[in-house]
Image (cartoon, grey):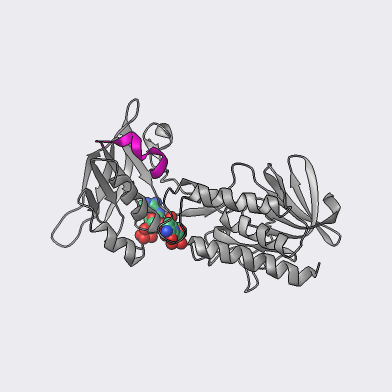
Amino acid sequence: MRDSLDLIVIGTGIAGLAAARQARQLNLGTLTFEPQFFGGLVINVNHLDGEIEGSGSELAASMMMEIADLGAQSVNAAVNAIDRDGDLLAVHADGEVYRARAVIVASGARLKRLGVPGEADFIDRGVSQCADCDGPLYGGKDVVVVGGGDSALQEAMVLAGYVRQVHLVHRRETFRARQQLVDQLAGHANIAVHWNTEVEAVLGTQGVEGVRVRTSGTAGRPANARDIACAGLFAYVGLEPECGFVPAAAERDADGRLITDARLRTTLPGIYAAGAVRSGHGGMLSHAIADGVAAATAVKTAIGA
Ligand code: NAP
């Protein structure tokens, strides 16, 4: 079985699931790898923002069932390395080697942490990165959300439905998030935006009790440091790609994401990348699905199986 594979898909977030589904529809012998739970970051989203009906976990579960029905095989293991074995690629996972004619890296990205004092001490004791899962724990309390991108605004609005007050702390004076989310934010009376402000430390004893912030000076207003009392801290300050197992020879951008061409080929023969792990990924669910489909289609064209 292992030597007869056409394709290995690494990661079963939405891009990987879309790639595996397309690959099976094109009749490629396909195996997926996933170290944790299928679905990727989207399983933390209860409402998919009108892009697609339902929740992230419902979408992932239905795609997972589809690829199983289509005959894709799945291995629950972390990939440690990829190297070449003659005409094939060898994927190393949990002491085993799996060979295929092509590999699609769809291992996604993880949420970055702030890296400030106190943050690591209070993970799951007030420091969270899942608004939909943990929001209900903060009913009637205040929370701080950090960031100015789509994630921070979207999750601040999710939290606003549960908590007394959301303090949205952003280091600049304009948001990077798309305008639709910026417009929606204005409709939430219990979200206060703290512009030009950065979190310096997370404060507390048994759990989070507040954050120390510093606001940079502007014309007519000096810089100041102060504490914001809160029971929870949710940092959405960007993503870092999960591709440490891909050979260092594969070119990456300044953020460590894999560089691909128009056919989603990385700079290493036979290795493709799809979704948030690749440079230039659009960031929306529809982009992840399109990436998966495009990469699997490119593999089919290349290997002609
Ligand atoms: P992002 O777009 O990279 O935004 C990160 C935000 O965090 C930026 O506002 C950045 O500030 C700020 N930041 C970065 N490092 C910081 C630090 N150390 N301290 C304080 N602030 C910091 O990340 P994202 O919002 O997670 O989005 C990632 C991708 O997913 C994007 O492509 C996005 O469009 C996509 N996404 C889409 C949806 C959707 O379609 N519904 C939802 C969520 C995310 P600056 O602005 O100053 O750089």
Q: Position of residue 147 (x, y in %)?
A: 35, 53
Q: Position of residue 141 (x, y in %)?
A: 25, 36
Q: Position of residue 47 (x, y in %)?
A: 41, 51
Of residues 196 and 243, which is closer to you in this image? 243
- Give the left or right position of residue 171, taking residue 104 as reference: left
Q: Give the image quarter of residue 233.
A: top left
Q: Give the image quarter of residue 28.
A: bottom right
Question: Going by the picture, which residue comes out furthest to the left?
Answer: 220
Please report the bounds of the magenta region as a residue range. Answer: 131-141
Of residues 174 and 45, which is closer to you in this image? 45
Q: Give the image quarter of residue 140.
A: top left
> Can residue 175 be seen?
no
Q: Residue at x 71, y 55 (%)?
A: 70
Could you tell me what secondary structure mostly forms the magenta stretch?
A: helix
Q: Is residue 146 above or below residue 212?
A: below
Q: Position of residue 148 (x, y in %)?
A: 34, 57
Question: Going by the picture, which residue comes out furthest to the bottom?
Answer: 262
Q: In the picture, which quadrant includes the C terminus?
A: bottom right
Question: Going by the picture, which residue comes out furthest to the top?
Answer: 206
Query: If the picture is divided into quarters, which one holds ligand 1?
Result: bottom left
Q: Residue at x 76, y 62 (%)?
A: 27
- Give the left or right position of residue 109, taking residue 162 as reference: right
Q: How many marks?
A: 0
Q: Residue at x 80, y 70 (%)?
A: 304
Q: Residue at x 43, y 48 (%)?
A: 46
Determine if the magenta segment contains residue 134: yes
Of residues 291 and 253, which is closer to you in this image? 291
